[in-house]
Image (spheres, rainbow, N blue to C red):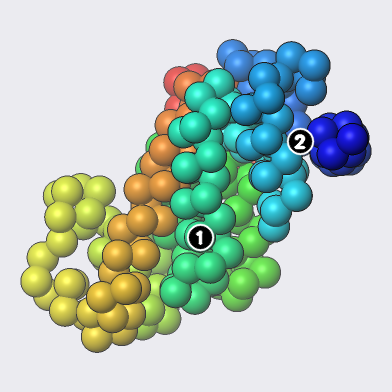
Amino acid sequence: MKAILRLTAISLLFAGSAFALTGERMPGMTLEQMTPAQRTIAEAIMSGPRGRMSGPFNAWLRSPILADRLQKVGEYVRFNISLDKRINEMAILMTAQAWGAQYEWYAHAPLALKAGLDPAVLKAIGAGERPANMKDDEAIVWEFTTQLRRDHSVNDAIYSKALEKFGEQGIIDLIAVNGYYDVVSMTLNVAHVKAPAETEMPFKQAGQ
């Protein structure tokens, strides 16, 4: 009986998700096509704070154990991270732009604006440019993330600034949000998970 109720709950969640089936190379699976392990992960994702199987999650179901690990990391860096949501979303958008992952930009640009990121800063990030007139914490995130991507490390000057502003936990969390959304962006690009065709994007989709 519990299994039937659980399956019914997942079915209802899928029915209400407009973004459940998105990847061209890894088409969305119906509940009947899922293994028990995949259904368990789908239920965990859909009943959690995200509420839907959008973005990379359908593709990740192909490796259920990995999907479970990744979605838990994602839940932390998205909803429970020590960084302010505004700068967290800023780092996510820098990652999306770096990878040419349009779906990631489509999903997170509105969240960044809602969290208080200046539209001018958003526009500059989309163009791959250093934004002008950033707040102090935004400038640290921009420089830290830029150095980390370009040099695969950061210099003492920006490390000290990040340490003073965010502490050691904040530094680790900033590294984690970059790394997690690297995996997200790579998955989206390989699985061909795309933003809606009518959506205006500030950069070209990778692979096109």
Q: Farthest residue toward the bottom?
A: 164
- What residue sits right under mark 1 in the picture? 76
Q: Which secondary structure lies at badge 2?
A: loop
Crowding around mark 1 (Cα neighbors within 10 Å: few <14, some 14 to 19, many 20+) is some
Residue 14 numbered tag = none
Q: Nearer the viewer, mark 2 or mark 1?
A: 1
Residue at image location 44% in from the left, 46% down from the top: 181
Judge whether residue 202 can be spotted in this image: no
Query: Residue 130's spot in the image, x, y percent?
Result: 35, 61
Q: Quadrant of the N terminus?
A: top right
Judge whether residue 151 can be spotted in this image: yes
Query: Residue 2's spot in the image, x, y percent?
Result: 84, 39
Q: In terms of depth relative to the viewer, which is nearer, 142 or 26?
A: 26
Q: Which secondary structure lies at badge 1?
A: helix
**Amino acid type shown at disc 2:** Phe
Q: In terms of depth relative to the viewer, which is nearer, 60 or 110?
A: 60
Q: In terms of depth relative to the viewer, which is nearer, 207 or 3?
A: 3
Mark 2 or mark 1: which comes first in sequence? 2
Residue at image location 44% in from the left, 74% down from the top: 82
Whether 33 is drawn above or below 201: the answer is above
In the figure, is residue 164 to the left or right of 193?
A: left
Whether 154 is drawn above or below 30: the answer is below
Residue 19 numbered tag = 2
